[in-house]
């Protein structure tokens, strides 16, 4: 083709791929942070109060 | 955390998006013929208008969600999070619109950028929603942030119809609308029209997948913020001499908690 077309497709696929990877990574990281906290919270709530 | 059904729906949308984007690339680069006037450059048409359409759609969702937050009967923090998530995805697609447009403009017009009405209003749209995202980072309570950004989101959306109509209202270098033109008669046919339609569908699926992920992240971030706030309040209330403050603080704490419920 002429270089410009390939550059356009590369930009679209690169940016969308990069942003998707960023979203997946962040989601995984936050899930890891939240899981133990929520588990601890549920444990505290189920513990009988004095 | 999230229902299994939601998880599977999102996964299915992700897989469909991947397949559709792959099909768009194959059709766009290899199967469709070159154009009589534009030659190979026409291939950029299969990605440029679809990413611009997704940007419009994303900002439309932001506006609807913002309105639902501002309206007291439907006020819920989930609308604010949805508005913000959609705006962020919209900014990515607006940036892609500008980049692919610029790459097309260089060989077609001889310049990477010109202060044409369509280009200028699109650049303004990009800056307006970047401002919206910046405004969300200004320290405030969840409710204050939601109200401010909902108003900003609605004001910014005024630019969307201006961008679309710019090629009709002003004499521009940018070509007129190929599909959604005033006469509603598409100026593209056959394989080319099918590939363009495929592009619109595939990038809409990509947007849906991204929005679902970004919205989930926004919910996680809000939960972490709530937990941190709870911990800070707990620590402060147990400091010596703060016992008397517990009664006074309670209504505010309840209010913050109510506003930040997702």
Image (tube, coloured by chain):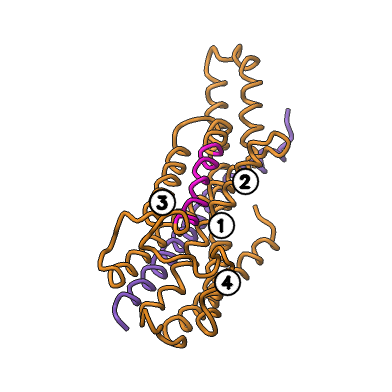
Callout 1 and callout 4 share a chain: yes
Determine the secondary structure under disc 3: helix
Of the pair B94 and B233, the residue shown nearer to us? B94
User: Mark 2 or mark 4: which is in front?
Assistant: 4
Of the pair B164 and B171, the residue shown nearer to us? B171
In this image, B87 relative to B78: left or right? left
**For the point 55% across and 80% down, which residue is it?**
B194
Nearer-N-terminus badge (1/4): 1
Q: Colour of chain B?
A: orange
Tell me where residue B3 appears, x and y as whole percent: 69, 58
Tell me which segment is drawn in magenta.
Answer: B150-166
Verify CB contact (< 8 Å) between mark 2 and mark 1: no
Tag 2 residue: B65
Checking the image for residue B57, the label placed there is 1
- Label 3 marks a residue whose chain is B
Tell me where residue B146 appears, x and y as whole percent: 56, 36
State the CA–CA distance, disc 2 to disc 3: 23 Å
Tag 3 residue: B121
Q: Colour of chain A?
A: purple
Nearer-N-terminus badge (4/3): 3
CA neighbours of label 2 inside 10 A, class few (<14), some (14 to 19), many (20+) = many
Image height check: is B244 above or below B195? above
CA neighbours of label 1 inside 10 A, class few (<14), some (14 to 19), many (20+) = some
State the CA–CA distance, disc 4 to disc 3: 25 Å
Tag 4 residue: B185
CA neighbours of label 4 inside 10 A, class few (<14), some (14 to 19), many (20+) = few
Determine the secondary structure under disc 2: helix
């Amino acid at each position: 083709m002429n270089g410009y077309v390939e550059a356009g497709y590369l930009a679209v696929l690169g940016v969308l791929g990069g942003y998707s990877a960023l979203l997946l990574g962040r989601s995984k990281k936050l899930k890891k942070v939240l899981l133990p906290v929520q588990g601890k919270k549920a444990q505290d709530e189920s513990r009988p109060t004095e | 955390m999230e229902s299994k059904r939601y998880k599977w729906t999102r996964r299915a949308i992700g897989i469909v998006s991947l397949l559709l984007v792959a099909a768009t690339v194959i059709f766009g680069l290899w199967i469709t013929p070159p154009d009589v006037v534009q030659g190979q450059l026409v291939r950029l048409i299969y990605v440029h208008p679809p990413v611009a359409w997704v940007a419009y759609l994303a900002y439309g969702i932001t506006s609807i969600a913002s309105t639902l937050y501002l309206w007291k009967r439907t006020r819920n923090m989930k609308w604010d999070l949805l508005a913000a998530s959609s705006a962020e995805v919209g900014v990515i697609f607006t940036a892609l619109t500008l980049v692919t447009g610029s790459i097309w403009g260089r060989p077609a017009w001889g310049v990477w950028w010109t202060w044409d009405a369509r280009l200028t209003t699109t650049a303004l749209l990009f800056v307006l929603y970047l401002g919206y995202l910046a405004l969300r980072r200004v320290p405030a309570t969840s409710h204050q942030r939601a109200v401010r950004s909902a108003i900003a989101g609605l004001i910014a959306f005024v630019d969307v119809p201006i961008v679309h109509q710019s090629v009709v209202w002003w004499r521009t270098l940018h070509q007129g609308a190929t599909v959604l033109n005033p006469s509603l008669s598409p100026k593209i046919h056959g394989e080319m029209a099918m590939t363009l339609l495929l592009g619109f569908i595939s990038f809409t699926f990509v947007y849906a997948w991204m929005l679902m992920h970004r919205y989930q992240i926004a919910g996680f971030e809000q939960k972490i913020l709530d937990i941190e706030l709870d911990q800070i309040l707990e620590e402060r209330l147990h400091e010596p001499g703060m016992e008397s403050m517990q009664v006074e603080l309670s209504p505010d704490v309840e209010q913050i908690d109510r506003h930040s419920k997702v």
